[in-house]
Amino acid sequence: MTAPARPPRRVSQILRSRSRDMLVLVVAVALLGPVMLLVQYFFSQRTSTLYTPIVDTTSRLVIDMRWAQSDLRMGRVYDLPGAADRLQARRTDSQASLDELRRLIGDDSEFAPALQELSTASDAWWRYANSVVGGGATVPVDTDPAAREAFTAALADFTTMVTAADTLHGLAVDKRTEIRDLRTAILVGGFALAGVIIVAASVAIARGTRRTAELIVAPVEELAEVARNDTGGGRGTRAGTDTGPAEVRALAAAFNSLLDTRDEFETTRDEQLGRLQELDRQKDAFVSTVSHELRTPLASIVGYTEMLCDGDGGELTDAQHRLVAVVQRNADRLRGLIEDLLTLSRIEAQGLDIDHDRLSLDAVVANVTESLRPVAARAGLTLVERLEPAEVIGDALQLERAVTNLVSNAIKFTPGDGTVTVTVGADQHVATVTVADTGIGIPAAEQEHLGTRFFRSSSAQHRSIPGTGLGLSIVQAIAEGHGGTLECDSVEDEGTTFRLTVPLWSAGAAPTA
């Protein structure tokens, strides 16, 4: 039975683990210095407050005792005056030294036996010295056995006292040397340990960084490589989801899911695009067929209505003339719609067949305004033209059609007593035909739809102004076929301005249709 797999760690867990390890190493290195300083301070204090004072005090005590021994010999032999005072001074000094040693050593088991031996011998010797110096007549040591025995005992006490003092001195010197050697060893060892810790910390940090890179960076780079490969056109590559932290695995899984969804979408899109293209082809074929099929009966209708109006079928009454005029007017509208549909079908199928000849744009526009001036007059409008000479590259028939659509729209959407202004101007590269009216305008929210087939503004629909919504699409196609542009500025209830640009003949070669 296999043990359950450990869940992948999160990025925060990995970073916290690495940070904790590094923090432990940094704290260890940081604490090593203060610990070494404390150890050095402890040893220095021990040396300066105990062992060195013991060495100095024992040296001073031995010197005082030797001087006291010399003073005792001189006073006993020669009975010099003041010997008792000098011995008392020596005793005071030696007692002070003993008291200092007792204070320093305290209950130290290593030093206490020698100190006890020193104190006992010192007290015995000083009792003998006081008895000799302050006891009156001196008894010859050579003739008195008791005096000789006392002298021998005092000499032994002095020797014991000096030996004990030397022992204390030696112990203190040895301890001081031992502590100094230990302090040096600790100092060297501390520096060595610090070096080892620093090296270990550096190695651990390097390994931790590399391990972190393996855990985090490597899966992210793999994911980035998959993204670059997919962006470059490589399909089917997927990121691994079994390595790296939990977040990276989740990101890789989400990215793979996104790629799968994208591939599925592209497959569906290609299928739908093929269907739409087929539908579009069928629609174009249908429009072309229907338009051609409608033209024949429509031509017959228009012809017979003209014959009726001319009286070929007999004289018509005024009421009959009005009815026939309605039929003729709607037949003309239907014929215009069919012509627009056929034109758009040809544009979508094979583009406009445009001649790129040198022509006078101002003459083309003048012909349009001349033909539409009666229409403007019947609508109660003022048609103003401002034409400057402009030699352009283009097709006179198509440009005339485009300008006619623009001016006709301006007349149609401008109420009575309004003004339609047609202007032709030129700069260094293009000629511009501007058609401005004071009509109903186009709402700002709807202006982005201008040029869309069958689009008609809400203002036109509310006022029941007739139209097919195909005119601007044809004008835009003509403008683009000439390498120009069609722009519009409009304010609702104030008017609309269209600008059609065409390259000048002097601007260079003709554009591609």
Image (cartoon, grey):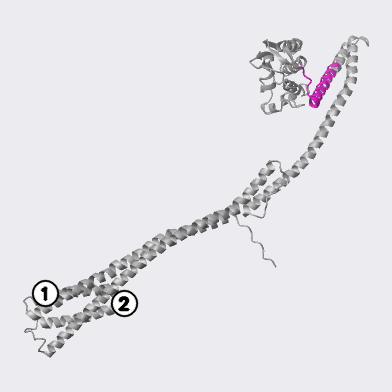
Q: Nearer the viewer, residue 503 or 342?
A: 503
Could you tell me residue 104's position as x and y percent? 27, 72
Quarter containing the N terminus: bottom right
Mark earlier in primary sequence (1, 2): 1
**Kind of residue sitting beneath label 1:** Arg
Left or right side of 264 for 84: left
* Mark 1 touches mark 2? (CB < 8 Å): no
Q: Tell me the distance, in whole angstroms, between the alpha carbons under discs 1 and 2.
A: 34 Å
211 versus 96 height, above or below:
above
Could you tell me residue 73's position as x and y percent? 12, 79
- Name the image quarter holding residue 41: bottom left
Q: Is residue 346 magenta?
A: yes
Quarter containing the C terminus: top right
Q: Nearer the viewer, residue 44 or 306?
A: 44
Q: Which residue is mark 1?
A: 86
- Name the image quarter holding residue 379: top right
Q: What's the magenta region?
A: 328-355
Indicate the secondary structure of the residue bearing disc 2. loop
Q: Which residue is mark 2?
A: 110
Res. 277 in view: yes
139 versus 236 height, above or below:
below
**Kind of residue sitting beneath label 2:** Glu
Q: State the mark number for residue 182.
A: none
Could you tell me residue 135's position as x and y percent? 9, 83
